[in-house]
Image (cartoon, rainbow, N blue to C red):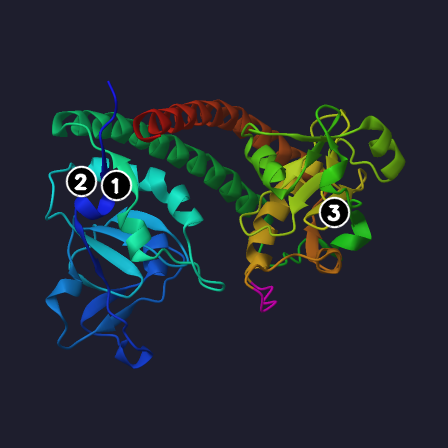
């Protein structure tokens, strides 16, 4: 049976928030909800105490859509508040539709909306373009069935993600117990600059025209992050073996137990190389740390750098939108060097926890794959 479609503008009215000025933001009254308050990227909540248009008031259960800079759809669950500009409040006043189904349909359509974005600096969706986006419009009963299935998968994904986070916290707690906070230099141990006890480098540049269908895998920061999490890579780029051997000699090739990290390492994504098979990584955007075996257990150093880089990333303050680690910053980073026996003890603990993480991550990836497949089936 052919799908029936409806325009978003035919389903509901979309009320834009109010352009609160900096002087309006205080410490009393109702919270002012900005895009960063929805995405969780800010803890700087402002409040407004005074008169306001009733249409910008939001309450638990309202559907909100951010349409500028960061496109997203959310169900608000934090009580009465006031809506800032660049966010729509959805008022379902035109056609009958299940709210949860609507949220999933809009979520799927975000990629289409991103292609319609306007503006050179702050990307945004023009309301007319937004209202013209088509989504499938089955019966209300079918909408509820679809939302129910997706809700169950989303809950499962959330539980598995939470389980992974708890295992990561276990690894971190054990680290703090044995070595102290990675943000502080524990003077009970030797302290050194990373560049004095490890080789820190990046690769050479390979241009897109050099890619081939099969050959030596080529990893960018995105692939390194996936490898660090133990997630599968959806698409792999390759360079020829001849080019690989021309560009890299034995000294510059990544080796077993080297640590690779994206230069934008805000989440501490560091992959410990666990294969002897050859591969290449992107210049500048991925940095390589080769620890000295007589000084480090690479598993210990990987975990230490994961904690350390997340802390140091927030201090970079380069003034750009996306701060990056440079080689000289990594080389000058002061680190602690516990006795190798303690490092080995901690590494054994990490390996045991990692076995559980691998199983959970595999289950999470399978559930996410099913969720994405059904989203495509329902809304594609």
Query: Mark 1 — residue?
Result: 103
Could you say whether the residue bearing mark 3 is in a helix, strand or loop?
A: loop
Is residue 183 magenta-colored?
A: no
State the SS at label 2.
Answer: helix
- At numbered mark 1, what does the secondary structure look like: helix, strand or loop? helix
Say which residue label 3 marks.
283
> Which residue carries the number 2 mark?
99
Residue displayed at 60% across by 64% down = 316
Q: Is residue 316 magenta?
A: yes
Callout 1: 10 Å neighbours few (<14), some, many (20+)?
Answer: some
Q: Position of residue 237 (x, y in %)?
A: 67, 32
Q: Give the image quarter of residue 280.
A: top right
Q: CA distance from mark 3 to mark 2?
A: 46 Å
Q: Nearer the viewer, residue 32 or 52?
A: 52
Observer-side mark, 3 or 1, equals 1
Q: Quadrant of residue 123?
A: bottom left
158 sits to left or right of 299: left
- Camera-side residue of 4 and 357: 4
- Above or below, 66 relative to 374: below
Q: Residue at x 52, y 29 (%)?
A: 353
Badge 2: how crowded within 10 Å, few (<14), some, or many (20+)?
Answer: some
Horizontal relation, residue 369 to residue 327: left or right: left
């Amino acid at each position: 049976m052919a799908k029936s479609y409806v325009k978003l503008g035919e389903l509901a009215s979309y009320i834009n928030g109010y352009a609160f000025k900096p002087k309006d933001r205080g410490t009393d009254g109702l919270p002012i909800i900005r895009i960063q308050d929805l995405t969780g990227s800010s803890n700087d909540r402002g409040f407004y105490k005074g008169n306001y248009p009733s249409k910008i008031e939001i309450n638990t259960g309202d559907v909100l859509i951010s349409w500028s800079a960061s496109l997203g759809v959310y169900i608000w669950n934090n009580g009465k508040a006031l809506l800032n500009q660049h966010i729509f409040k959805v008022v379902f006043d035109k056609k009958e539709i299940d709210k949860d189904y609507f949220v999933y349909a809009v979520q799927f359509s975000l990629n289409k909306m991103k292609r319609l974005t306007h503006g050179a600096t702050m990307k945004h969706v023009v309301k007319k373009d937004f209202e013209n986006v088509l989504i499938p419009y089955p019966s209300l009963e079918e909408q509820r069935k679809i939302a129910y299935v997706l809700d169950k998968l989303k809950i499962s994904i959330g539980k598995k993600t939470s389980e992974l986070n708890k295992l990561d916290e276990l690894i971190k707690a054990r680290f703090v117990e044995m070595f102290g906070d990675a943000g502080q230099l524990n003077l009970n141990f030797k302290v050194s600059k990373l560049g004095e006890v490890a080789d820190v480098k990046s690769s050479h540049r390979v241009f897109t025209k050099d890619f081939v269908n099969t050959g030596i895998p080529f990893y960018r920061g995105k692939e390194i992050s996936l490898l660090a999490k133990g997630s599968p890579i959806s698409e792999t780029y390759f360079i020829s073996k001849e080019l690989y051997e021309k560009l890299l000699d034995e000294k510059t090739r990544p080796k077993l137990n080297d640590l690779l990290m994206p230069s934008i390492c805000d989440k501490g994504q560091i992959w410990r190389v666990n294969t002897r098979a050859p591969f290449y990584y992107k210049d500048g955007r991925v940095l390589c740390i080769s620890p000295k075996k007589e000084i480090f257990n690479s598993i210990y150093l990987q975990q230490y750098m994961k904690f350390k880089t997340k802390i140091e990333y927030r201090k970079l303050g380069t003034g750009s939108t996306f701060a990056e680690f440079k080689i000289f910053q990594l080389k000058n980073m002061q680190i602690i060097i516990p006795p190798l026996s303690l490092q080995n003890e901690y590494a054994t603990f990490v390996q045991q926890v990692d076995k559980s993480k691998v199983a959970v991550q595999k289950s999470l990836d399978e559930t996410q794959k099913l969720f994405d497949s059904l989203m495509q089936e329902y809304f594609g």
